[in-house]
């Protein structure tokens, strides 16, 4: 690891390990990161300089051979991948709540670090607990179909969960099937900073909240799932400050769609709202 990455890692480590500590620790780490690649403001300034130079050259009827600088908010992929891997390392050794004691494998999340869209479920189930990968069971197979129907591949998106370890109704028996439960508020509270940091690092344009737990955690504690489902909101996070606006839309969890196949049409209507906003589909009149 080179020096600059070590510094980012140290900052992230503090942030992720100490829930009570001021989030400035992370800001400091990311400022170092920006200093290495140029901050958004610096990049904007460089961009403006470039445009002025280009205009001057054009006025003089000359052409410029310089290439435009990378735009603001563009973190290098290599850097993002290192941050995501570092967060995963933290998650894999996390013991901040009881779920850490009973899990077989933590499930940090996976996918493209440059994803334009991130899918967020509730928490790992039986299969995910064994494989350490998100959405690999029956609900995952349906999610893959949903992603494909939206015109993406699983490799193009990032898939994560609100909590990173399997919440079980009977934690003494991890081999029992149908042993899943929704995560408790205290489990969500300690785990959310991992997800929030993943969202900040990946910086997608859109997040899809799959199901009520994800919607409650990321959209609104007070509104019902029915009230928020299928509508686009600005994502507001509690532990990190985003570098650009990110939109979020909630729809049914794939496991709920397996139990209630009649809801699939509704889910697709919800996702069409997102696809229209992305410009991948005409907007409904
Ligand atoms: N359900 C979820 O919410 N997440 C998974 O990863 C798998 C099933």
Image (cartoon, rainbow, N blue to C red):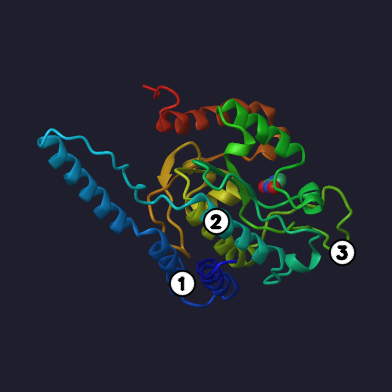
Give the mark nearest the N terminus, 3 or 2. Answer: 3
Q: How many dots with numbers?
A: 3
Q: Is residue 277 above or below residue 102?
A: above
In space, the residues marked 1 and 2 are separated at their CA atoms by: 15 Å
Residue at horizontal 65%, vertical 26%?
262
Instruction: Please state which of residues 67 and 118 is positioned toward the viewer in this rendering.
Output: 67
Q: What element does badge 3 sit on?
A: loop
* Front-most of residues 9 and 126: 9
Please name the residue that numbered disc 1 is placed on: 23
* Left or right placement of residue 55 versus residue 106 in this view: left
Position in image of residue 132 (x %, y %): 75, 53
Of circles 1 and 3, the one toward us is 1
Q: Residue at x 42, y 28 (%)?
A: 276
Any part of residue 217 in sight:
no
Distance Cα–Cα, label 3 vs label 2: 30 Å
Q: Which residue is mark 3?
A: 172
Estimate the x, y position of residue 265 in percent, counting from the top left.
59, 25
Of callouts 1 and 3, the N-terminal one: 1
At 72% from the left and 59% from the top, the residue drawn is 165
Residue pictured at 52% horizontal, 27% vertical:
269
């Amino acid at each position: 690891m080179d020096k600059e990455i070590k510094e980012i890692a140290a900052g992230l480590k503090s942030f992720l390990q100490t829930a009570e500590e001021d989030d400035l620790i992370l800001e400091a780490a990311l400022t170092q990161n920006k200093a290495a690649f140029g901050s958004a403001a610096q990049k904007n300034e460089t961009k403006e300089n470039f445009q002025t130079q280009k205009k001057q050259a054009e006025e003089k009827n000359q052409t410029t051979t310089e290439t435009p600088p990378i735009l603001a908010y563009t973190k290098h992929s290599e850097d993002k991948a290192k941050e995501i891997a570092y967060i995963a390392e933290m998650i894999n050794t996390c013991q901040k709540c009881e779920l850490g004691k009973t899990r077989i494998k933590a499930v940090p999340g996976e996918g493209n670090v440059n994803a334009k869209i991130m899918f967020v479920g509730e928490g790992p189930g039986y299969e995910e607990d064994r494989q350490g990968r998100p959405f690999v069971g029956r609900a995952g197979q349906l999610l893959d179909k949903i992603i494909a129907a939206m015109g993406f591949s699983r490799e193009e998106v990032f898939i994560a969960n609100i909590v990173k370890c399997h919440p079980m109704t009977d934690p003494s028996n991890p081999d029992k099937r149908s042993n899943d439960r929704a995560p408790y508020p205290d489990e969500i509270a300690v785990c959310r900073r991992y997800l929030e940091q993943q969202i900040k690092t990946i910086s997608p344009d859109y997040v899809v909240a799959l199901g009520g737990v994800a919607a409650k955690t990321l959209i609104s504690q007070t509104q019902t799932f029915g009230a928020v489902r299928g509508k686009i909101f600005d994502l507001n996070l509690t532990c990190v400050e985003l570098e650009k606006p990110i939109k979020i839309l909630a729809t049914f969890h794939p496991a709920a769609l397996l139990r209630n196949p009649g809801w699939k049409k509704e889910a697709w209507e919800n996702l069409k709202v997102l696809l229209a906003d992305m410009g991948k589909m005409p907007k409904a009149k």
